[in-house]
Image (cartoon, rainbow, N blue to C red):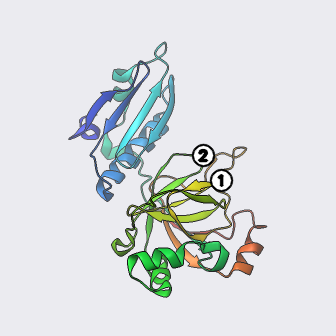
Amino acid sequence: MADWLEGAHIRPSGENAFVVEYGDVIDHAIGERVALLTNALDTVALEGVVEVVPTFRSVLVIYDPDVTDEEAILAALPDSADAPSAFGSAHFTVPVCLTGEAAEDLFEAAQELGLSEETMRERLLGATYTVGMYGFAPGFSYLSGVDPSLAIPRRRAPRPPMPAGSLIVAGGMAALTATSMPTGWYVVGQTAITLFRPTEDPMVPFAVGDALTFKEVSFDELARLKDDVDGGTVRAHKA
């Protein structure tokens, strides 16, 4: 158990949960530790554990206090050397349209950053992103790995609702959205993939720690891919 908690802080969260914190920044090494602990807890599947929720820097563990407790959960963890690794186990290529009405704010964002639209597209397509966490809304996936030159601040006021499947950027991060809603981020693209599938297991297409790269498609191709079960997304490999 010691290896899992080395350098970590464990904090209570109400009467039936605790948080394991590995840091306070978005960092690849921290994200790896989060994903590995999450996978280990899911693999152990200890009775009484209700849910394990990873973030960029921490893991929230919710449990039934009538069945188990923090000490028992942490004691059930395998030796870290023997634990299965999930971080970066899959790499997906996700088609996105980065032009026209699918990328409503790309021109504005490029202007704010002092870039041409084409340069911004190239840098969006040239990066490899890591799924850091889900949050805010079901299927809303936060991505790290954004080119530092695209670190644009959030808008001063939210813009009108964006389409589901939007690729958005702000604050040095990117995200893929599952539902239409107002946002303070910039809409720079759109994918055809369904990002929240409540009747399926898992309900989301990517695991925390998975890698994503984007492949540009036309708006017509995007419309066609919406009839595809995976929106044209391809799992490139498993490690």
Give the residue type at disc 1: Thr
- Quadrant in which the N terminus appears: top left
Quadrant position of residue 229: bottom right
Rounded to the nearest angstrom, the CA distance separating label 1 from label 2 is 8 Å
Q: Residue at x 50, y 22 (%)?
A: 48
> Looking at the image, is 230 positioned above or below residue 181?
below
Residue under label 1, please give it. Answer: 179
Mark closer to the observer (1, 2): 1
At which x and y percent is residue 25? 29, 52
- Residue 87 point in image, percent of width and height: 42, 55
Closer to us: 85 or 211: 211
State the residue lying farthest toward the top. 66
Q: Position of residue 168 (x, y in %)?
A: 52, 64
Report the number of discs: 2
Q: Amino acid at mark 2?
A: Pro
Mark closer to the chain start, 1 or 2: 2
Q: Position of residue 142 (x, y in %)?
A: 48, 56
Residue linked to disc 2 = 138
